Amino acid sequence: MQRFRRPFKTLPKRLRSSSLAVACLALAACASAPVQEMSDARQAIHVAEQTSIAPPAADTLQKARQLLLKAQSELEAGAYDNARQHALDARDQAIRAREQASPPLPANASGSL
């Protein structure tokens, strides 16, 4: 018994266009709001703010705040991929600010007394 297979190219043009549109919409619906990334960025900024910040670190922290604001506005606009990336960048900048503010530990500091 021979199966009848109809390749995609032989489908009517309208059906192909509709199928493609449905597939694109389905993929777009899969993008979710970057809730966790936004939360992580806010927490990292809060921790950095609790550290005594020197001028170079203050600039980095300000950049983190600006990136978080940009992520928030993109989130509200529905640009989830851009919002996610800016939230991750904000988190990284806040961590960098905290690291810049904290003096490095001495080489012989092993944590034991």
Image (cartoon, rainbow, N blue to C red):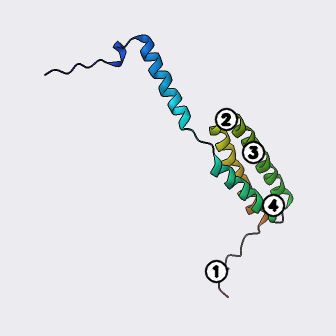
Residue 12 is situated, as x and y percent measured from the top left of the image, at 39, 11
Any mark on residue 78, and which?
2
Q: CA distance from mark 1 to mark 3?
A: 36 Å
User: Can you tell which of label 1 and label 3 is closer to the viewer?
Assistant: 3
Determine whether the residue tagged by mark 1 lies in a helix, strand or loop.
Answer: loop
Residue 95 position (above or below residue 77): below
Neighbor class of circle 2 (other Cα within 10 Å; few <14, some 14-19, many 20+) is: some
Q: Residue at x 67, y 55 (%)?
A: 40
Helix or strand or loop: what does disc 3 sit on?
Answer: helix
Q: What residue is shown at x 57% (from left), y 38% (from top)?
A: 31
Residue mark closest to the camera, 1 vs 2: 2
Residue pointed to by mark 3: 67
| Marks 2/3: CA–CA distance | 16 Å
Q: Is residue 91 left or right of residue 49?
A: left
Q: Earlier in the sequence, mark 1 or mark 3?
A: 3
The residue to which callout 4 is attached is: 49
Q: Amino acid at mark 3?
A: Leu
Which residue is pictured at 77% across the width and 44% down the height? Answer: 69
63, 2: nearer the viewer: 2
Question: From this viewpoint, is residue 92 visible?
Answer: no
* Residue shown at the point (44%, 21%) measured from the top left: 19
Where residue 21 sits: x, y (%)? Answer: 50, 22
Left or right, 42 with respect to 59, comes to left
Whichever of callouts 2 and 4 sits on the residue coming sooner in the sequence is: 4
Q: Is residue 104 above or below residue 37?
A: below
Please name whichever residue, 18 or 86, is drawn nearer the observer in this view of the structure. 18
How many neighbours does mark 4 have within 10 angstroms: few (below 14), some (14-19), or many (20 or more)? Answer: some
Gap in angstroms between the C-alphas marked 1 and 2? 48 Å
Q: Is residue 109 visible from the viewing direction of this image?
A: yes
